[in-house]
Amino acid sequence: MKNHWKALSYTSKFSIIACLVCFVLGFLSMGLTGGLLYYTVFFVLGNFPHLDEIHGDWVWPAMLLISWLFPLGFIFGGLAWHYLKEKVESRILLVVIYVVTVWSWIAFLWYMTLLANNKVM
């Protein structure tokens, strides 16, 4: 296992550590992370309301779930980096792709959550 860890690239190590750290922080924050993440994507969610206007019994569990699922975006970003590093020569472009992948995952999580609970709002 130790040799396998040493064989991983810097980006893969970063993605795994970021995923674990953000999962623990999401767990300990009791949903605060999910709420803060909403502010990073609410402007692309279309006609859905602002976080202050969302109410119901589903909101806090949704924020918890998003806090726990969003760290997977780091894994997706690491996979994107891994598969694109041979095709893309610009490191800056790879970083942009990584960040956009993580951000898109957050937007997807919130969009699906709001879509599933739209009738409750």
Image: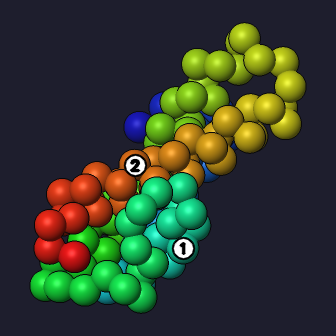
* Amino acid type, callout 2: Phe
Quarter of the image for residue 9 reads top right
Quarter of the image for residue 27 reads bottom left
List x then y, in percent, for residue 86: 71, 12
Sequence-earlier tag: 1 or 2: 1
Numbered disc 2: secondary structure: helix
Image vertical order of residue 11 relative to residue 84, above or below = below
Quarter of the image for residue 24 reads bottom left
Q: Classify 10 Å Cα crowding around label 2: few (below 14), some (14-19), many (20 and above).
A: some
Numbered disc 1: secondary structure: helix
* Amino acid type, callout 1: Tyr
**Looking at the image, which residue is at 50% across and 78% down?**
36
| Label 1 – label 2 distance at C-alpha | 14 Å
Q: Quadrant of the N terminus?
A: top left
- The numbered disc on residue 108 is 2
- The numbered disc on residue 39 is 1
Q: Quadrant of the C terminus?
A: bottom left
